[in-house]
Amino acid sequence: MIRTQVVIAGAGPVGTVAAYFLAQQGIDVLVLEAGADCALDLRASTFHPPTLEMLDTLGITPFLLERGLKAPVYHYRDRGTGDVIDFDLGELHDVTRYPFRLQCEQYHLARALAERLDQHPKASVRFGHRLVSVAQDETGVDLVVETPFAIERVRADWLIGADGAGSTVRKWLGVGFEGFTYPEKFLCLSTTEPLEDYLPNLAYVNYVADPAEWLVLLRVPSVWRILLPADPDSSDSELVSDANRDRVFKHLIGKTGVPTQHRTIYRMHQRVAERFRQGRAMLVGDSAHLNNPLGGFGMNSGIHDAFNLCQRLVRIINGTEDEASLDQFDRQRRGAARSFIQAQTIQTMEMMKQGLAAGQDRRREELLRTRADPELRRQFLLRQAMFQSLRDAEAIA
């Protein structure tokens, strides 16, 4: 039987951040990943300022800055009129060393940390290791793991489930995953075509509202990404076809035959686990909460989960804090997921569907009023940059 202090299921960005944090604090940690490598997930690509500050304590932010694009300004656009309402995170220069969103694919973070963990004396990352079962008692957690060649057993003091939306850990704990799935499918296209040549004054981050077909335009270092809703009755093959690609780009930039590097279909969810802690097992990231990607909050809130939890685990393992602290982790991070992440992303989705300049649209007027008022604008930026959600969570006893 393998013996370790902490097992983390999942080698995505949240799981590897948690593992590296614990290893750096002298905690023995084992990461189990069912896949052969860190997943090449194209969805998460935005790092918010407080996340960059957290990662800086692990020495990883300079690595991301070298590979990402700084995006202080982002736009809310009306597709019909061309109106643009812009906000600039640079105004938060007195709050953070990083007054911008960093556009960088999440797999860069996961792979870099997995490599560092592989060289760390307190850590081990095992790819091709699928968690089969979980059982726990008052002193630890017993795991059964399927490897390419055998069935292994692991005994750990603590278990962290960072194994995604279909979390095996969450299922074995019997924790409900409350919420809903959007009826629409969503299509993500990526292209090297310079969209900025066709759309004037284009920011790196653009939320384009339209009642007929809203979309999100995001720039990452290698490509532009276009995210838009798709007909749920159409087959996936129809949605990723050349004909549909040509329809999207004809409407967007008046051009067909645009080269695409990826064409992917997603389902989007709004779900929160009914609890983030059960005994000696905890849930973080997509294992604990899912939301639509508008705002780029998903991966970031998962990393915030990991820091909140791992700071407590270190103190508990070192004997300076009681295990009851983990109940506060549950309250704080579940509260943040429900009151901020879910509410904010649902509101943004509804705004995008309605269009910003449709008649006397209330939301458009609200955004214009917010931009014009320095105090309202500052509070808005603090919410969008996720500082306010962290403050609200920390206030939960």
Image (spheres, rainbow, N blue to C red):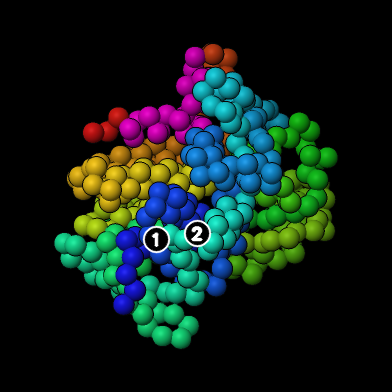
| In the displayed structure image, the side of residue 321 where residue 384 appears, left or right | right
Q: Is residue 324 above or below residue 12?
A: above
Give the crowd class for mark 2: few <14, some 14-19, many >=20 residues within 10 Å.
some
**Image x and y of residue 26, in percent:** 39, 52
Q: Report the number of discs.
A: 2
**Image x and y of residue 277, in percent:** 26, 53
- Number of the label disc, if any, that sits on residue 328: none
Give the crowd class for mark 1: few <14, some 14-19, many >=20 residues within 10 Å.
many
Give the distance between the C-alpha atoms of the residues marked 1 and 2, in whole angstroms.
10 Å
Determine the residue positioned at 69% across, 61% down: 262
**Image x and y of residue 185, in percent:** 54, 58
Determine the residue positioned at 58% across, 42% down: 61
Q: Which residue is labeled 1 in the image?
A: 29
Q: Amino acid at mark 2?
A: His
Q: Quadrant of the C terminus?
A: top left
Q: Observer-nearest residue: 116 or 76?
A: 116
Q: Is residue 132 above or below residue 343?
A: below
Q: Observer-nearest residue: 359 or 186?
A: 186
Q: Amino acid at mark 1?
A: Val
Q: Mainly helix, strand or loop, the magenta region?
A: helix
SS class, disc 1: strand
Which of marks 2 and 1 precedes in the sequence?
1
Which circle, 1 or 2, is nearer the viewer? 2
Residue 386: in magenta span: yes
Q: Which residue is labeled 2 in the image?
A: 120
Residue farthest along the left direction in this orientation:
138
Q: Which residues are magenta?
A: 375-394
Q: Quadrant of the N terminus?
A: bottom left
**Image x and y of residue 241, in percent:** 70, 66
